[in-house]
Image (spheres, grey):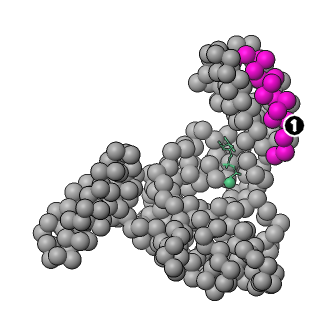
Amino acid sequence: MAGRHLKELFRAFRMNDELAFRRAATEIIEEEEGKHHFALARDLQRLMAGGSSAGLDVGSYAVLPEPPKDREGDWALAEVRTPERTLDELVVSPRVTATLRDIGTEVPLWAELDQHAVPRRQRFLFQGPPGCGKTSAAEALAHELRRPFVVVRLDAVVSSYLGETASNLRRVLDYANQAPFVLLFDEFDALGRTRDDAAEHGEMKRVVTAFLQMIDKYRGPSILIAATNHPALLDAALWRRFDEVIDFGKPSVHELRRLIRLRLRPVPHKGVDVERYASALKGLPHAAAEKLVWDARRFALMSQRKEVTSDDMDGALSRVTARPW
Ligand SMILES: Nc1ncnc2c1ncn2[C@@H]1O[C@H](COP(=O)(O)OP(=O)(O)O)[C@@H](O)[C@H]1O
Ligand SMILES: [Mg+2]
């Protein structure tokens, strides 16, 4: 067994990183197969299939392949993470909550849907202004489904050569065929922009169209989520390619209040008029309400206090409302 793989195993153990552990284990199994130690390889495989310590449900896909790289092998095109955010931490409209929970219930029943020839929903478009929970919701969905969360690195995917961008996308979707992931193409409209301005606008639009066609044809085990802050940039006819379009709108004052309460819950606080702060943040994204509480906690800690006061919140409020969102 190569020392490199052993080191990776030990490192993964120390970091408590199940995904890295599985990747190292996969390489060891492949190496043993290469040496014709089939009985050992099979035993190892069986041990790996016995479930997951982090609660990830990779089913029969006991081995997780290495994320794809670009043609030169210099850049990883995606990053695999164990999801940590949960749906409970999100404050979204009842409709969005219901849709996300539905997907959580539906995905484990795919085999049944297939049997009855009812189409699965596995391509989702998350749209809405920045800071309203698109990225967090994708991660929370992965958590709900106990699947590894794969974030596609669009900066690595987009090449100055248009043909190469399409090949990179193909590599990413091939990867999505190899195990049940929740795969996020975050701010995917960036595909329509170039690294340099050599390409014409029409050509870039072709890349977005090619991407949507690839998504359209995808029938693998993963869930594909594309997120965008700029729905206006996309052609109306493209929505059809998604099984569901979910709107992450700006929060209502009621939702801002819920979010401030939720983030204050684990923290001792005194005399904080949540109502007032929620009204003051009207029109701002969820991320602003979250930052309000973080900043207030920071003020409190910097003055060596355990309790967050309304002075901390007021100081935070003036900062949060002064900055752009
Ligand atoms: N709906 C929401 N509920 C709870 N927290 C949110 C919500 N939307 C955003 N946040 C918080 O704001 C930050 C940015 O959210 P993110 O999911 O990256 O937004 P987006 O992808 O829509 O730009 C995150 O730290 C997240 O916790
Ligand atoms: Mg985002």
Q: Which residue is mark 1?
A: 322
The answer to whether residue 127 is left or right of residue 148 is right
Residue 99 against residue 296 in the figure, above or below: below
Residue 8 lies, in percent from the top left, at 33, 57
Is there any visible trace of residue 115 in the rendered image? no
Magenta part of the chain: 307-325
Judging depth in this view, the residue of 237 and 278 nearest the camera is 278
Task: Find numbered disc 1 in the image and state the secondary structure of the residue it sits on.
Answer: helix
Nearest the camera: 246 or 41? 41
The residue at 57%/82% (across/down) is: 167
**Magenta-colored segment: predominant secondary structure:** helix
Relative to residue 270, is residue 320 depicted above or below? below
> In the drawing, does residue 49 fall left or right of residue 302?
left
Q: Amino acid at mark 1?
A: Ala
Is 259 contained in the magenta span? no
Q: Residue 154: x, y in percent? A: 63, 68
- Could you tell me which residue is drawn at 56 percent across and 60 percent down? 151
- Nearest the eye: 181 or 154: 154
Indicate the position of residue 280 as horizontal and vertical percent values: 86, 30
Please say if 321 is above or below 303: below
Total count of labels: 1
